[in-house]
Each structure stands twice: as structure tokens, then as C-alpha cells.
Image (cartoon, rainbow, N blue to C red):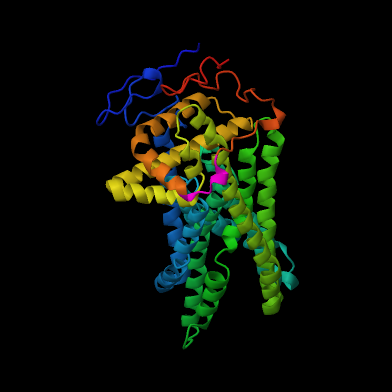
Amino acid sequence: MHESPQPPSQQPISAPVPAPPGGFPAPDRWHYKPRRALWDNKAVRAGTLILLLALCGLLILALVREQTGTQGFLVGLGLAILPVPLLIAAFRWMDRVEPKPWRNLVFAFAWGACAATLVALLANGYATKWLLNTIDVAHRGDINTWGATFVAPVVEESAKAAAILLLYLYRRRDFNGIIDGVVVAGITATGFAFTENILYLGNAYASDRSFGASGFSTTAGTFVVRVLMSPFAHPLFTSMTGLGFGIAASLPPARRLLRALVPFAGLLTAMVLHGVWNGSASLGGLGFLAVYALFMVPVFGTLTWLTIYSRQTELRTIRAHLPEYQAAGWLTPPEPVALSSMRARALARDTAKRTGGPAAARTVAEYISFATSLAFLRQRAYRGVISPDFEARERELLHHLWQRKQVAQPALAQASASVPRAFAGRAAPMPYGMPPGATPYGPGAQPGWAPPGAGAPWAGRQR
């Protein structure tokens, strides 16, 4: 019989709670913390990134203000910020099943708004000068079109992709699939478009004022095209890169070549879409509208359908994998049903809020988040994507569920009544044709402990 490993003893931070499985103390904020190198230290990484983004923000602010003037900058800022809350709300809605930490999204937006735009502004400027010095005088009128079609997409999409790559490498726990990639990419591109719109709208306003225009014709036209007609343009392009990283995150480690090629293919697709969009501006009004209606809108609709389908797949993942923990005694029978329904989740939070106030609602929300992460952790194991700290991470998530079960489980049990019974009791199939009774986990990956009174169905199975 495998003996349960004991975590370091800690003093409870608040009132004692029922003892969790394994017989070890139950501090409210116990957290698994593996040893890390200096650069892997969160404080070092956070401080370095904050300093870098702050410097980039100051530089891009100075450059944009220099080009637009103070009045143009303020007008551009006021108009450019209008679509930002709507875009962020849309991406947060996509991410409702397993919401990503705000720090990741804040970093993505800041990178797009500061670092990526600074790189793009400088690189595009140098590229334009190079084209002016190398292209024949007779063709210099086409320089802006060539730069926008062939240079800007490569520079801008590469700069935005850097944020996705950093989160993919250093926040792998929060990067599990397609939805995660699309959301991170969309937020990054929203920040990029925000700063770029300030520049375009500010320049348009300055142009109107310098020519003594009685109205704001250039500013209004720029606002209609960039803010009303195509607020999704940059998020759409960069979402192709995020889609590639999301697919790579779901592949097993053994498929190294494919994991490297898929993000690169996504980046190339983003560049092509960006180039087609920029090039359509040179086709005139009808050509631009044709590209917009026949190309960009269908691509946007396809991506929207894919993200909604992926979100439903995430809910099916929860419904498939949590019954294993319910059978082991960690969850009550109604919970896998309730946790796999967005409606039941909302009802559970509302129920807890009515009976226990905002604190109880937060507890239920935390319980839902930990249970979702647990289902995805087990799904990755079924796919062969097992991290070295699998068991420790699983223990941590189960521990947090145990701490909150007295508040969350009654609310989820009541909310489960809103879910059709046809969804209950569906367990995950064994992957890749494994026979019944086999385990998809490698040595040391499956815990040998279970809740008290559950019959210890995992006991002695660790190999």
C-alpha cells in the first residue's frame, strides 16, 4: 500500500477546517512551490517586465505625442479607447470556462500597447527609409503601399507574437488550448490597436486643423474605418498566432516538431491576413469593401465559431474527467454535472451569495476555478502531456477544493437541478485505445490517496 506523502507542516491562518485527505494539517493557503532558478523567480521576472514595459510606454508616449501634437494626442486617445472595453469584454466572455489570471491579460495588453507598438513604429520607420534609398525614383509613390503590405505585417505580427510566446513559455499552467491562445492574442492585439489608433486618429485631427477644415472630415473617416468598421482587425490577425500556440499547447511533448511548426504556421497566417487587409486599402473604396465583405468577415465568423465550439469542448472535458474524482469520493455526484454547465455555475454563485453573502459567492467561484483546473490537468495527462509536478499540482488543487467544499458543494448541488440529466455520469474514455483498467499515467504520476471513507480506490495503484 502506497503511503501518502506529507507536505510541510504549517500553522492554519484562520479558523480550523476539517482535516483533508492523507492526515496532514490543513492551512487555508497551503501552496505547492517548486524550487526555481533566479530567472524563474516570479519577483525577478515581474520586476524586469514592469520596468521594460514602463520604459516602452514612456518612449511610445513621447513619439506619438511628437507626431500628433498635444491636442491630436488627446483627441486620438479619447476616440481610440472607445472600442477597448467591448473587445476586452468579448475575449473575457470567451474565457469564462477557465478565466485566465488578470496579471496575464494586463501583461498582454501592456505588451501590445507599449512594447509591440514601439518596435513596430521604429522598425517600420527604418524600413521606409531603406525603401526610399533603394527603390527607383519612378516607383517611390508605391513605397507606402509596399511597406504596409509586405513590411508592416511581418514586423507588427512578430512583435505581438512575442507576448504570446512569453506566456506560452513562462505561464504554461495557464496556457492549455485554443481558447487560451486566442484570448491572449486578442488582448495583445487590442492593446496594439489602441496605441496605433491614437496615432492615426491624432494625425487625422492634426491634418484637419492644419488645412483649416471647418469640420473633421479626415478624423471622422479614420474613426469610421478603424474604430467602427474594423475594431476586430488586429485581434483577428494575431488570433491566428494564438491559435497556433493553443494547438501546440494541447499536443503531447513527444511531437516536438509539430509543436514547433504549428505556432510558426499560425504566425505566417497572421502575416498573410494582415498583408491582405493593408493591401486592400490601395484598391480604392469598392476594392476595400469587397475584401472586407468577402474575405475578412468570413474569416472573423469562422474564428468566432471555432472559439465557441472550443468553449463547449472545454465544458465537455469537465463533464468527462471530474466523475473520476467523484467516484473516488472527492466530489459529490451532482458536482461534475453542475461544473460542466455555465448556467449552473452562475446559479451556484447566486445561491451562495443569497445565503452567505459576497464572501460565499467568492468561495464558490474559487471552487469552480480549482475544479476546472483539475479537470484540465487530468485531460493533459490522458493526452500524454504530464509535467514533472503533476502529483503535487493535483494535490494542491484537491486541497483547495477540500477547504471550500462546505460552502460550495451545497450550492452546486442545488444548481445541478438546472442541467439536463442526460449529461450526468459520462466518464472520459481511455486515450489512444488503452484497455479498461489501464492507467495513462507514468511512474509517480498518480496519487495513492483518497478522501476518508471513499474506499481509497487509488490506494496501492501507484507504480
Position of 239 with respect to 57 (left or right) is: right
Quarter containing the C terminus: top right
Q: Position of residue 51 (x, y in %)?
A: 41, 45
Residue at horizontal 44 percent and vertical 16 percent from the top: 5
Q: Position of residue 20 (x, y in %)?
A: 37, 25
Position of 462 with respect to 84 (left or right) is: right
Q: Is residue 118 visible?
A: no
Q: Is residue 423 magenta?
A: yes
Position of 18 with respect to 91 (left or right) is: left
Residue in front for this viewpoint, 449 or 427 = 427
Residue at horizontal 67 percent and vertical 75 percent from the top: 289
Q: Position of residue 98 (x, y in %)?
A: 49, 45
Q: Is residue 282 visible?
A: yes
Residue in front for this viewpoint, 206 or 259 = 259
The extreme bottom residue here reads 214
The range drawn in magenta is 418-424
The extreme left residue here reads 15
The extreme top residue here reads 1
